[in-house]
Image (cartoon, rainbow, N blue to C red):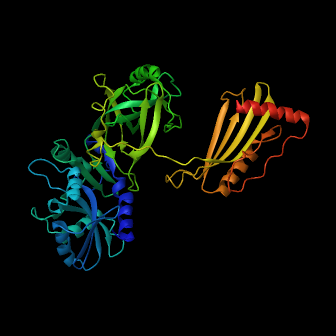
Amino acid sequence: MTDSRLESLARHYKASVAGRYRAIRPGDLQLIPHALCFVSRKIDGELWMAELHQGKACLFARGGRLIEKGPVLDALMSIAQGCPQPLVIAGELHVPAKGEARERVGDVAAALADGKQQSLAFAAFDVVELDGSAPPADYHQRLEILQRLVDSDDAHPISVVATEELQEPGELRSHVQNWVESGKAEGLVVRSSVGEIYKIKPSFSLDAVVVGFTTRASEPDQVRSLLLGLQRSDGSIQLLGACGNLPGETMRRELLADLLPLECPSSFRHSSSDGNLYRFVNPAVVLELSCTDLQSEDSSGDPIRRWALHHVAHEGWQPIVDAIAVSMIHPVVVRRRTDKQASALDVRVSQLQEVLPDLDPDAVLEPRELPRSTLIRRQVWSKAGKGGLAVRKLLLWKSGKDEAWPGWPAWVVHFTDYSPDRKTPLERIIRSALSEVEAQQIADSLIAENIKKGWEAVGTESEVQTDIPRAKKVSKPKDKKSASSAKTAKKSTNA
């Protein structure tokens, strides 16, 4: 295993540099600032790093992965002889292609799994750390450090990524034609002297099935956003993400008309970027998508996870587990694929294997079992109005799920406001907290803000078995009139 310092280095570089490349299409070169830039071919491999110092070398990657033998490590140790100061460099670990073919990241995973380190090569492209400190901010200086250190040779397993200095991004057009549009390379990496890094790649094309939709607030007869998925071999659907970029209002209307009759129940909930919940549909409509890039890791270098769902006829969607997936960059709906079906062939999840080489479309996903939440505090109030009885309710839960699933809140406060004579009769407020003290403070604050004069307490905390201290119970109504009102309100809320 790598030590914690090297792991921290790898994660920090991925989050602050490699994970923040801006993906653009070949036709969007005008987005690159008009300034000096450095262009290199993007090698389709895995990001690895090497620490070099006085004949010692360590080749490592995130997650504690090490390569401890093979031609690449031997060559790095030879290069380290010329490193009087500790140096950490980043590069693409890859399997060199033969002939006119290009590298494939899947070949790296296969070589590492089979112990075939002799087939690997390392193409350095950046300096991560120099003598324990940050390297020069100017990429030209970092590139010169690499070029002085590495004597590139076609027969050598270590090289520096061939990089050309351009005076302005307009000169990129020929490079795009020679490498990207021809298919000779996965793409180009452009480092602008103003500090931005761009990844120029041809668009990915995917066929996906529509799982849910939302509508536009201003044009309710049009689809606003679509929730999309791909099918695994066992019939489950792996969520791919959402797309709201559709080719025109006519298609938005036509899609809504086709999707409305397909609406079905779902025990899984998913909200769109504007906060609306998706309305789920039976999997039947297939769309062709185009996106600039597919990412398998977030900005922190952690795997992207999305829910896999199971669809049951007449019962709708049921969640299975959050599985490793991808994130689409700049997705666009291209067209409706009436010639394709929502099947494991036409919308297969294996379309992602170019960016997820370890993806097993035949793997059976085991449902995630989570502990049940515990109700700690429950209070109900009512108030008579012209339109009927208004009810407000506060619930405080200890989720018990935070240890089983990182990211799940430990405590949840839920406040419900029902008023029959309001335009939106039911409104909800949900707050999360890290501790019971914080949760109780949130609950008290919600009560102070929403329970004013005229509201009568008609319910108390649930009688639950728990070792956690509970807040004081609300006193019961003393007079007969209040007691009668409380009984009526309790019957209404239970209903």
State the residue in front, 327 or 147: 327
Find residue 412 and report its horizontal and vertical position in percent: 62, 48
Rendered image quadrant of residue 335: top left
Q: Quadrant of the C terminus?
A: top right
Rendered image quadrant of residue 231: top left
Side of 93 relative to 129 (left or right): left
Rendered image quadrant of residue 157: bottom left
- Seen as rendered, the residue at the extreme front is 465
Q: Quadrant of the N terminus?
A: bottom left
Find residue 460 and report its horizontal and vertical position in percent: 76, 44
State the residue in front, 248 or 86: 86
Q: Going 44% across and 40% down the picture, which residue do you hit?
A: 320
Question: Is residue 31 visible to us here?
Answer: no
Q: Going 8% across and 49% down the picture, which residue do you hit?
A: 99
Question: Is residue 268 visible to us here?
Answer: yes
Q: Is residue 379 above or below residue 426?
A: below
Q: Is residue 487 above or below residue 188?
A: above
Q: Going 17% across and 71% down the picture, which residue do you hit?
A: 74
